[in-house]
Amino acid sequence: MKKINTNWIGFGILVCAWTFSAVRYAGISTNLRAEESESDGSKRVIRVLHWQLEPGYRKGIDHAIDQYNALPHVQAANVEVRQMAVTERVYAQFINVHLISGTAPDICVSGMSRLLGQGAANARYFDAISTYVKEPNPYNSEEYLPENLDPELKSFLSSSAWSETFSDGMLGGWDDQLQDYFSVPVSSWGALRVFSNQEMVLEIKEFARKAMAEGSAPWLKNLLEEDKLLTVDDAFRSWLASDEMPNSLGRFFFICSAVEPYGESIGHDNLAAISASNYGAGLLDWLFRVALTAKMAPIIDVNHNGINDGWEILGGWQSGTWDFNNPVLKNGFFDANRFIARFYPVGYLGLDREQAVRRFLNGNAVFIGSGGWDASTMFRGAEGSFTVKVLGPQPSVEGERWYPYSAGVQNEAETRMGVPMSIYKQSRNKEWALDFLRYLSSFPVNEEMNRIAGWVPVVVGAIPEEHMLPFLPYTQGIKPSNGLSLNHIPPPVRSAYEQQFPLYQSGDISYDEFIAALASAFTHERNGIDRMWWNDFVSGQDRARSTDRAMVLVRLQAEEAGWNETLLNKQSNLMESSLQGHDGFGSPYRFHTLFPKRDFPEY
Amino acid sequence: MGHHPYYMVDFMSKPIAIRRLTALSLLTLLSACGNQSATKDPEQLIPLARAEMQAFRFNEARKLLKKVENPFPETDPRHAELLYLRALSYWQSLPPVPADVEASVPLFMRAAELAPEANFAAACLLYVGRIYDLRDYQDDPPRWEEAREAYQKVVDNFPDSQEAAEARIRISMTHLKQIQDADKMAQGRDELVSWLDQHEEDAMAPVVATFLAGLYDFHYTEPKQALKYYQIADKLGFVNQTRAGNYLWRMHELALEEKQIENAAEYCRRIVEDFSRSGRGYEAWLVLKQLAKDHPRLELDVPEFQDFENRSSDSSDAGDAK
């Protein structure tokens, strides 16, 4: 029998694949051609590109688009807005290719792409909109606002500058390096929170009440006498007897601690307290990271700018200003981190986001940490099974284990609005793109769009869906930058922290072993903290160069328009950035201020 | 093409798609081989180059200008302007080419020499200073003597220009960058102090005041001086309003150190009322309440703490799915 040449099979597959892609390509092109014919017939198509594929978001945008397309002046101009939603897995590549090739859609959600995070990329690819944000938004004029709206709010919205009508003053669209507005934020996913299964929490409380009445349960004895989690006083008893959700860090961990014995008592061995995964575990950091590290701020923040920068954390360790045996860190932050890991499912780092969400929605976990972007998924997924309650900040209160180390919960006052939409520089429909963004960020449209989407609106006075209320920024608390972000320390030593921390957290190594490993990494000759100073110096010089380029651009504008107030202000702001970075010598400046007698490390 | 900003629109919709695709590939190859974007019209060179640069396309401007002979006679002001733009494109193109960066220096100098009255003449000299001062490419050492010389020319030849203020500050910074030399640092600092005394009306004055405040606060640890310069910057108006809340917060801390209770309270009040989005609103409000309690004689006014307007009173009870 004649042997089949297997090469032909491969060739055949290749031909089939080619034919399939060619047909698909031709199909898509034909559709686009049809749209182009519309353009030839003077129809203008404005495309809006984003990556928000969460349930409801596209529906919300579609609703706003349909209303806009139906406006008389839009129809008269034969303009049509369409949305393009691209999965976040390929969004960065998609937008990069089209920005560089000059074929990007008229409106793009900026972000995700590294290209857009570099230096002056915003100015290269998108139009600055500072001129327009100072004027009122025409779609906030009284004729577009609901009749029954509070007259004061009505007057504010219709007369204020467009930027002032955003809850964050439009800072979500501001580029501090270029000193210009480059995008219009249209939605906010709100803050990080803990979702809880209300019925289960109440059952656990009842179980705990019984255990307390009996007084002999070992888990309770350990928790109160060995772990000293909290003091059982009248306030605690009253909370335990109520149907209130946990409202302090100690009470939250009390419920978590009772989950395992409760699960055993009802034969539910797989019940986890917290549905953690490689995605969600870090999100619970939110509960206590700032509170349990902020007391370090007075000794870390040596330049007093209100931020504990990476160089201050590491430089402070290097100079001996602080160490890991500081009680705030050892008995506060790291202790709480090890404590919380008791409540994660075994092997949680091998689980992904979907698995964690499924565990929670199937009733196999009591809590899960996430943000407003998952709210619709949680509420819809739990419908008919259990009640989802969202837990707000959990402060440590007197008598609780970490109270002596806590500086209070963090506020979210600096929360920036999200989904920043920018106008592509090479768009041929800039004026319509701008018009649509004004429409989308007007009070009634933005409120309704975000209510449909299940997100938080960005306009002052706009009310989100009721289930999104817990995700509104919490303003009472300390500034988040008071806290330490040890997982964001500069790269030469960050990897050591990232490797050692999970080992410590899971109990594989002791605290002493953990800090010894860190000390070894911090003092490493090639990749230790000294390397950070050098790396900072190199990147600082690049930043100085980039700021200088922006100043050149302002001067080019001034050569044509003359030095007006806007340009002078912009140039002054850029000069301030330049001086804050010591004109490229920020790292040696900081190093020699901390270590006047040492030579600057060079690599 | 119509108004469509999108891609692959025109050339795949007909039956001869494959042939067109092949032709397109060939065209792409050919255009890549002979990419010459230079315009033939000399009148258009300057506006085109400026437009490219204003769109941050310095590389495209460089392509446009590099191989073109300057079509204007030296007596024509456009000759100098073209030199200036060419130098700018050489200097700013990315990635930086050392030879191009170095070549831009004589072009800037020549442009300034040919057109000393032009509105870009001061910038030419300032940029020469920046080239010597900053690291433009790897292994580009700072040449501070040369930089100072160029900056000084801006100060001497164009004393009333916007660039003169920047040049003066940059001269001081060349001293302040020599951090291990305390005398040089002091020289730079004193120069800035002296400049600020004489130029409080300049747009750069609050910038210099803020910088001096930070310098005294961190490097010299002199809280009194730090507060003094923050107060000057505040009086002149902080240029970066997004950082103003942080500056006021630091000012309240320094004022407390200096026992200026009323000032500290005033800074806190302003944070609560005007800069609550800085993230310090609540803390400032607590400090203010405490100060009012500790110093009743001062009769401090404590405003109500304003929460975000669209927040519910008890958010933890919202979110009910059943």
Image (tube, coloured by chain):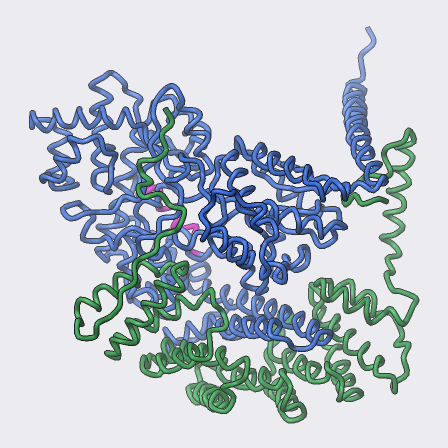
Chain colours: A blue, B green
Work out whether residue A597 can be spotted. Answer: no
**Is A199 above or below relative to A463?**
above
Extreme bottom residue here? B156
**Is B282 above or below relative to A70?**
below
Residue A274, x across and y down, in percent: 32, 32
Between residue B189 and residue A593, name the one nearer to us. Answer: B189
Residue B279, x across and y down, in percent: 38, 58
Picture mark count: 0
> Left or right: where does residue A296 sit relative to residue B206?
left
Work out whether residue A61 can be spotted. Answer: yes
In magenta, the rendered stretch is: A493-503
Q: Quadrant of residue B143?
A: bottom right
Residue B114, x across and y down, in percent: 80, 88
- Residue at 24% across, 75% down: B261
> Left or right: where does residue A46 sit relative to residue A400?
right
Q: Quadrant of residue A344?
A: top left
Q: Quadrant of residue A259?
A: top left
In the rendered image, residue B261 lying in the magenta stretch gets the answer: no
**Is A351 above or below relative to B74?**
above
- Residue at 41% across, 72% down: A591
- Residue at 69% across, 84% down: B122
